[in-house]
Image: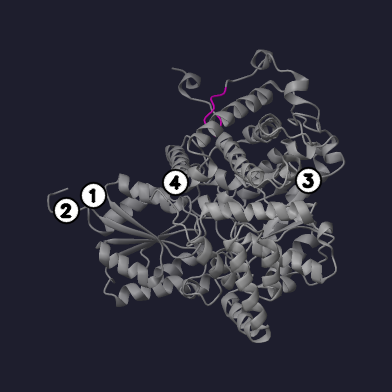
C-alpha cells in the first residue's frame, strides 16, 4: 500500500477528509438558505453585517490570582496593554467552593489558596478590586464562572455599581455560570446539584431580563466540554442541549416569552484549537444551528434571540509543558482560527499554561497576539473570508449534521440535566479523553515537543509564575476584620431572608444582593445553599 | 505473575481542591490496563490520604498536585508519621521543572509532569517495587 492508502486523514473529531474538495461536495448548497450574508439568517457567515470593520473582536483574557489587590493589579496591567474586557478568575478553594478561608477543607490546603484565582470572599473584596476601575466604562465578567458562585459574584458587582451611583441598566458584561466547568470538567466538592443550579441560572436570566438589558446572564462554555474530552460537534451539541434546558425552564416558569430572554442565552463560548479548519467551521456551523434551533423549535422572531455570539477561547490543554515558547505559535494559530470563524471575542491561552498560572509576561504576549492579528494581518477587512471554499462549506455542513445527531443522543438520555446528573456525559467525556491519549501515545496525533521533536534540555528559560504565598493569611486577616466591622444583626437577617427565598420559588437575586450589601461572606452564603439545595456527588467514572 | 504476587495497589488522590480530572483519569486507566489495582480517592487531605492508603493496603500513592507545596509537605509528613514511610509516592500535575528537585527532597520518588508517557510511569513503579508486573 502506498503511504497515502495506509494513512487515514481525518479531522481532530474523527471526520474523514479527502485530499481535496470540489463543487460536487457542496452541490445543493444554496447561498440564501445555507449561508446568508453576515448579519443575516442563518448567520453562518457572522452575526453582524460589517463584522470586524465595525467592531473588532474583544480582547478578553481570563486573569487573576492571589489577593483582591493582586487581581486588581493584573486587571489594570491587561487593560493598560489593550485588553478590551476583563474576565475575573476566582480562587477554587474558597470562592468557587463557597468556603470561607477558615473552612476545614480550606485549612487543610491553605498553602494552595490563591493559586488558581483570587480569593473573593465578600463585597469588600470586590470594592478592593474595582477601586479606580469605572464599571460603567468596561465590559466585565465578574467571576461567575461556576454556577453556585455566580449569584454572589453578580450580586457583588451589581451592588458595587449601585453603591457608586451607576444604574444597573448601564452595565455591560457577562456571566458564565457554566455547567461544563464545575459539573463536568473541574468538579467541585460538595457543590449544589444540577437541578438547583438550573434554578439559580434561570433566576439570573430573569433578573437580567428585567433589570440589565446589556448583560449576558449565562454564557454556556462549550470550551469546557471540549477540554474535557468532547470533540467539535459534541461540543456544539452539548451547548445546544444546555441552552434547551434554560429555554424550557424559562418557558415553564411562564413569566417571559422566548424573545424576551433568549438573547441572554445566545452568547456562548467555544474552544479554538489545534484543528485549524475544523474550529473555523465549528463557529459557522454553530451559528447556523443556533438560528435553526431558536426559530424552528422555539419560534423565536426577534433577531436578538437567534443571533449566536461567540467567545473563542484557545485550548489550554494543547499548550505543552515542554518547550513552552512553542505555545506562542499555538496561541496565534488558534486565535487566527477563531477570527476566521468570526468570533466576537478571543482569549489566548498563555505560553506558560502547561507549567503554572499565567505570568504577566505571558499574558502580555497573549494580548499582543490578538493585536497583531487585528492590526497587521489584514483579516479584519473582509467578513467570513473563507466562505465558498469547497472544503469549508462541506465541513461546516458535516459538523452541523453530526451535531444535530449528537443533540438527539443527549436528549435521549432524558435531556441535558439528566445526561449530566446520571454520569452519562462524564462517561462520554472520558471516552474522548482516552481516545485522545491513545492518539498521542501512538503518534497518530503529533504534539511537537511531546511525542516528536523532543529535546532533553529545555532551550529557553521560562520562569514559573508564583501566586502570592500569603494569600490565605491575608484572606484570614480580611475576614476577621470584616466580621468585627460589619453589622452582624443585618447579616443574620439577610441570610435568614436568603434561606427563605432559596426555599421558595422567588428569584434569589434581590435577597442575594441584600446579603452581600450586609457583607455576608461566601462561606455563609454557601452554608445556606448547601443546607437548602443539598450537595451532589460528581458521578466520575473513576 | 506467581500465585503469591498480588497486583500492585495504587491510591490516586488530588491534593488540591482543583477538580480537573483528565490527568488522574488517564493515569488511572493506564495503571489498570497494566494490571494494577487503582483506587481513586478524589480530593483528599493529608489525613485522608494516609487513612485511605492504610485501609486500601496500597503499595503506591500517586498524587496529583499543582502549586505551592506546603500541602504536599504535610502529606509526606503524615504518611511518614502514620507508618507509611515505605510506600512509594509519585506525583504528577502542572509542576514547573524548577520545582521537581524540591519535591524529591520531600520524599516523592518521581514527578511526572504533563506530557509524560504513561508507560514510563508503569515502568517506574514496577522497577521501584522490584516487580515484573
Q: Which residues make up the magenta segment? A: A11-17
Local crowd size for mark 3, using a 10 Å CA cut-off: few (<14), some (14–19), many (≥20): many
The image position of residue B35, as x and y in percent, is: 26, 47
Q: Is residue A131 visible?
A: yes
- Find out whether the residues at labels 1 and 3 contact each other: C-beta distance under 8 Å: no
From the image, tell me which residue sits under label 1: B133
Disc 4 element:
loop
Q: Label 3, secondary structure: give it.
A: loop
| Quadrant occupied by the N terminus of chain A | top left
Secondary structure mainly formed by the magenta segment = loop
- Report the mark closest to the observer, 1 or 3: 3
The residue wearing badge 2 is B5
Q: Estimate the x, y position of residue A439 in percent, counting from the top left.
A: 46, 37
The structure residue drawn at horizontal position 49% and vertical position 58%, both measured from the top left corner, is B19
C-alpha distance separating marks 3 and 4: 36 Å
Q: Give how far apart the Cα atoms at labels 1 and 3 are.
A: 54 Å
Where is residue A287? Give x, y as percent. Answer: 70, 34
Q: CA distance from mark 3 to mark 2?
A: 61 Å
Please indicate, yes or no, whether residue A322 appears anywhere in the rendered image: no
Mark-to-mark CA distance, 2 and 4: 35 Å
User: Alpha-carbon neighbours of circle 1 within 10 Å: few (<14), some, or many (≥20)?
Assistant: some
For disc 2, the chain is: B
Residue at the extreme bottom of the image, as rendered:
A484
Chain ID, mark 1: B
For disc 4, the chain is A
Sequence-wise, the earlier of marks 2 and 1 is: 2
The residues bearing labels 1 and 4 have C-alpha atoms spaced at a distance of: 32 Å
Q: Which mark is residue A423?
A: 4
Question: Are dots 2 and 1 in contact, CB under 8 Å?
Answer: yes
Amino acid at each position: 500500500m502506498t503511504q497515502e492508502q495506509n494513512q487515514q486523514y481525518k479531522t481532530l473529531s474523527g471526520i474523514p477528509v479527502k485530499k481535496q474538495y470540489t463543487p460536487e461536495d457542496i452541490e445543493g448548497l444554496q447561498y440564501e438558505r445555507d449561508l446568508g450574508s453576515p448579519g443575516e439568517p442563518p448567520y453562518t457567515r457572522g452575526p453582524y453585517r460589517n463584522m470586524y470593520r465595525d467592531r473588532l473582536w474583544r480582547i478578553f483574557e481570563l486573569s487573576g490570582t492571589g489577593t483582591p489587590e493582586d487581581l486588581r493589579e493584573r486587571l489594570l496591567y491587561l487593560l493598560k496593554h489593550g485588553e478590551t474586557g476583563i474576565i475575573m478568575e476566582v480562587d477554587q478553594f474558597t470562592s468557587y467552593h463557597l468556603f470561607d478561608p477558615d473552612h476545614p477543607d480550606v485549612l487543610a490546603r491553605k498553602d494552595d489558596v490563591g493559586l488558581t484565582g483570587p480569593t473573593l470572599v465578600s463585597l469588600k473584596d470586590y470594592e478592593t478590586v474595582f477601586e479606580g476601575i469605572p464599571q460603567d466604562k468596561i465590559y466585565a465578567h465578574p467571576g461567575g464562572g461556576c454556577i453556585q458562585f455566580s449569584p454572589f459574584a453578580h450580586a457583588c458587582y451589581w451592588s458595587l455599581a449601585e453603591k457608586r451611583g451607576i444604574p444597573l441598566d448601564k452595565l455591560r458584561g457577562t456571566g458564565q455560570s457554566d455547567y461544563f466547568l464545575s459539573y463536568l470538567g473541574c468538579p467541585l466538592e460538595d457543590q449544589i446539584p444540577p437541578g438547583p443550579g438550573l434554578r439559580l441560572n434561570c433566576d439570573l436570566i430573569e433578573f437580567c431580563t428585567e433589570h440589565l438589558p446589556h448583560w449576558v446572564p449565562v454564557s454556556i462554555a462549550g470550551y469546557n466540554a471540549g477540554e474535557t474530552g468532547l470533540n467539535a460537534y459534541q461540543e456544539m451539541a452539548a451547548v445546544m442541549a444546555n441552552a434547551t434546558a434554560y429555554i424550557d425552564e424559562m418557558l415553564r416558569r411562564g413569566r417571559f416569552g422566548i424573545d424576551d430572554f433568549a438573547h441572554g442565552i445566545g452568547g456562548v463560548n467555544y474552544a479554538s484549537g489545534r484543528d485549524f479548519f475544523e474550529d473555523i467551521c465549528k463557529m459557522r456551523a454553530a451559528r447556523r444551528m443556533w438560528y435553526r434551533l431558536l426559530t424552528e423549535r422555539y419560534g423565536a422572531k426577534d433577531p436578538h434571540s437567534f443571533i449566536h455570539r461567540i467567545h473563542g477561547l484557545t485550548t489550554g490543554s494543547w499548550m505543552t509543558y515542554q518547550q513552552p515558547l512553542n505555545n506562542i505559535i499555538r496561541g496565534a494559530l488558534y486565535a487566527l482560527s477563531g477570527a476566521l470563524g468570526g468570533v466576537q471575542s478571543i482569549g489566548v491561552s498563555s505560553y506558560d499554561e502547561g507549567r503554572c498560572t499565567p505570568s504577566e509576561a505571558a499574558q502580555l504576549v497573549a494580548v499582543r497576539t490578538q493585536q497583531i492579528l487585528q492590526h497587521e494581518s489584514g483579516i479584519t477587512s473582509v467578513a467570513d473570508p473563507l466562505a465558498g471554499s469547497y472544503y469549508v462549506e462541506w465541513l461546516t455542513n458535516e459538523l452541523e449534521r453530526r451535531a444535530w445527531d449528537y443533540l438527539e443522543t443527549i436528549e435521549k438520555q432524558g435531556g441535558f440535566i439528566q445526561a449530566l446528573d446520571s454520569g452519562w456525559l462524564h462517561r462520554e467525556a472520558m471516552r474522548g479523553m482516552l481516545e485522545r491519549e491513545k492518539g498521542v501515545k501512538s503518534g497518530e496525533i503529533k504534539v511537537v515537543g511531546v511525542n516528536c521533536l523532543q529535546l532533553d534540555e529545555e532551550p529557553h528559560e521560562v520562569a514559573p509564575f508564583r501566586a502570592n504565598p500569603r494569600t490565605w493569611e491575608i484572606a484570614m486577616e480580611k475576614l476577621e476584620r470584616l466580621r468585627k466591622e460589619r453589622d452582624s444583626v443585618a447579616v443574620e437577617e439577610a441570610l435568614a431572608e436568603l434561606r427563605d427565598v432559596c426555599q421558595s420559588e422567588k428569584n434569589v437575586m434581590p435577597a442575594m444582593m441584600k446579603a452581600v450589601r450586609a457583607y455576608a461572606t461566601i462561606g455563609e452564603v454557601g452554608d445556606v445553599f448547601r443546607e437548602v439545595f443539598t450537595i451532589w456527588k460528581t458521578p466520575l467514572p473513576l | 505473575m506467581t500465585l503469591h504476587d498480588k497486583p500492585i495497589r495504587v491510591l490516586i488522590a488530588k491534593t488540591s481542591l482543583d477538580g480537573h480530572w483528565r490527568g488522574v483519569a488517564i493515569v488511572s486507566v493506564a495503571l489498570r490496563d497494566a494490571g494494577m489495582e487503582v483506587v481513586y480517592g478524589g480530593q483528599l487531605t493529608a489525613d485522608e490520604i494516609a487513612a485511605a492508603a492504610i485501609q486500601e493496603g496500597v503499595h503506591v500513592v500517586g498524587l496529583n498536585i499543582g502549586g505551592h507545596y506546603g500541602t504536599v509537605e504535610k502529606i509526606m509528613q503524615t504518611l511518614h508519621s502514620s507508618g507509611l514511610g515505605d510506600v512509594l509516592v509519585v506525583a504528577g500535575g502542572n509542576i514547573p521543572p524548577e520545582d521537581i528537585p524540591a519535591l524529591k527532597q520531600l520524599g516523592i520518588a518521581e514527578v511526572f509532569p504533563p506530557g509524560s508517557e504513561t508507560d514510563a510511569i508503569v515502568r517506574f513503579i514496577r522497577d521501584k517495587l522490584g516487580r515484573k508486573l
